[in-house]
Image (spheres, rainbow, N blue to C red):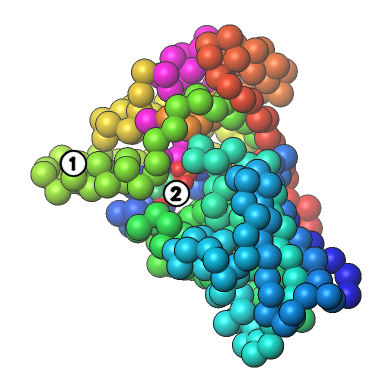
């Protein structure tokens, strides 16, 4: 039996993080320069049902049966077994690797789940649609992150830019003009669960004020949808900066993120904001193609630990 291989990209949120949890839209794009890979390596000499999980990046080498009940890899694997309805699981090794930075707002957990679910469903001869893969990856996200909006699993399973509103059919954006983005990792790590719960506490203490801020973020995201499709840099830059100011008001920014944002803008970025859960993780800067190197250099100089550039390209039909 051949080795089965599946890959899933990273993602980055351009607009609407946090507000998306409250029913507002968000826009996210796949980042294909980084990815998670799952390989299913059949083990013809093993006992039936003997499944080994190897993830050298996190120093994991264990029998599947020894993983904790709430281990995300174990959950993704078991969901895949259930989906395929397999009664007799052959012996195999599930090998997982990823170049997506962890806990940095780039969807590493959803990409790993997506790669596992895709590889295992292919292995069992029952390939799932992108929607089905997304739905299973979402179940893993719920166990890991509490109340995720579902944006990560959607953008990653479909590998397309999305305009996403919780519990509504997703819209894939048909990009007409390319835009170019510089992603810089602050090196600070704050779990998304923590900032989502802090925003919830703020909202519960003053729903009127914080509700209004989240609504404004939603409005920005709706306006950004068309600007992004058309590649309108001036309009996008203003919307990005405004989105950042509102994220500061819900207390998910941080001094390091703001230092990086200023560095990017001083080096010529059209707009810059934090991306994802915040208080660490990444910032994204929108750039014209000729300024990307300058912005990347300025961000490294200001303390970024990693730069990833990505372009959102015109959809080919
Ligand atoms: O930190 P990330 O990129 O995984 O994104 C978190 C985005 C939030 O809106 C803060 C939470 C969510 O579940 O959408």
- Label 2: element kind: strand
Residue 54 position, x and y percent, is 68, 56
Residue that label 2 marks = 26
Span shown in magenta: 256-279
Figure quadrant of the C terminus:
bottom right
Q: Residue at x 48, y 18 (%)?
A: 260
Within 8 Å: ligand 1 and the Cβ of disc 1? no
Left-right relation of 279 to 261:
left
Within 8 Å: ligand 1 and the Cβ of disc 2? yes
Residue 233 position, x and y percent, is 57, 29
* Residue sitting nearer the eye, 169 or 114: 114
The span from disc 2 to disc 1 (Cα, nearest Å) is 20 Å
* Residue sitting nearer the eye, 39 or 12: 39
Left-right relation of 109 to 296:
left
Residue 45 position, x and y percent, is 83, 75
Relative vertical location of residue 18 with respect to residue 273 in this rendering, above or below: below
Please say whether residue 257 is one of the residues in the magenta stretch: yes
Relative vertical location of residue 20 with respect to residue 265 in this rendering, above or below: below
Q: Residue at x 76, y 61 (%)?
A: 39
Where on the picture, by quarter, is residue 65?
bottom right
Please say whether residue 276 is one of the residues in the magenta stretch: yes
Mark 2 or mark 1: which comes first in sequence?
A: 2
Q: Residue at x 57, y 16 (%)?
A: 299
The number of numbered badges drawn on the structure is 2
Q: Residue furthest right?
A: 2
- Mark number, residue 175: none
Where on the picture, by quarter, is residue 311?
top right
- Label 1: element kind: helix
Residue 135 position, x and y percent, is 52, 70
Residue that label 1 marks = 202
Label 2: few (<14), some or many (≥20) within 10 Å?
many
């Amino acid at each position: 039996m051949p080795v089965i291989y599946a890959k899933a990209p990273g993602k980055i949120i351009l607009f609407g993080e946090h507000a998306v949890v409250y029913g507002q839209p968000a826009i996210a794009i796949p980042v294909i320069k980084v990815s998670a890979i799952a390989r299913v390596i059949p083990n013809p000499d093993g006992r039936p049902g003997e499944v080994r999980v190897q993830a050298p990046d996190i120093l994991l080498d264990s029998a599947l049966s020894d993983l904790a009940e709430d281990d995300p890899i174990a959950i993704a694997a078991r969901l895949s077994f259930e989906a395929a309805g397999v009664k007799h699981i052959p012996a195999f090794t599930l090998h997982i690797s990823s170049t997506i930075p962890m806990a940095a707002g780039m969807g590493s957990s959803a990409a790993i789940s997506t790669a596992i679910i895709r590889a295992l469903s292919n292995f069992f001869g029952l390939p799932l649609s992108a929607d089905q893969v997304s739905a299973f990856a979402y179940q893993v996200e719920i166990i890991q992150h509490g109340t995720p909006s579902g944006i990560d699993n959607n953008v990653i399973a479909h590998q397309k830019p999305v305009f996403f509103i919780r519990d509504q059919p997703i819209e894939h954006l048909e990009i007409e003009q390319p835009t170019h983005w510089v992603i810089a990792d602050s090196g600070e790590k704050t779990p998304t669960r923590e900032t989502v719960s802090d925003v919830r506490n703020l909202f519960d203490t003053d729903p009127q004020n914080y509700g209004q801020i989240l609504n404004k973020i939603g409005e920005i995201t709706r306006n950004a949808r068309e600007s992004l499709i058309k590649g309108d840099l001036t309009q996008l830059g203003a919307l990005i900066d405004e989105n950042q100011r509102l994220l500061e008001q819900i207390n998910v920014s941080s001094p390091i993120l703001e230092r990086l944002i200023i560095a990017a803008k001083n080096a010529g970025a059209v707009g810059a904001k934090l991306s994802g859960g915040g208080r660490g993780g990444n910032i994204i800067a929108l750039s014209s193609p000729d300024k990307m190197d300058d912005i990347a250099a300025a961000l490294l100089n200001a303390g970024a630990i990693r730069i990833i550039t990505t372009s959102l390209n015109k959809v080919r039909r």
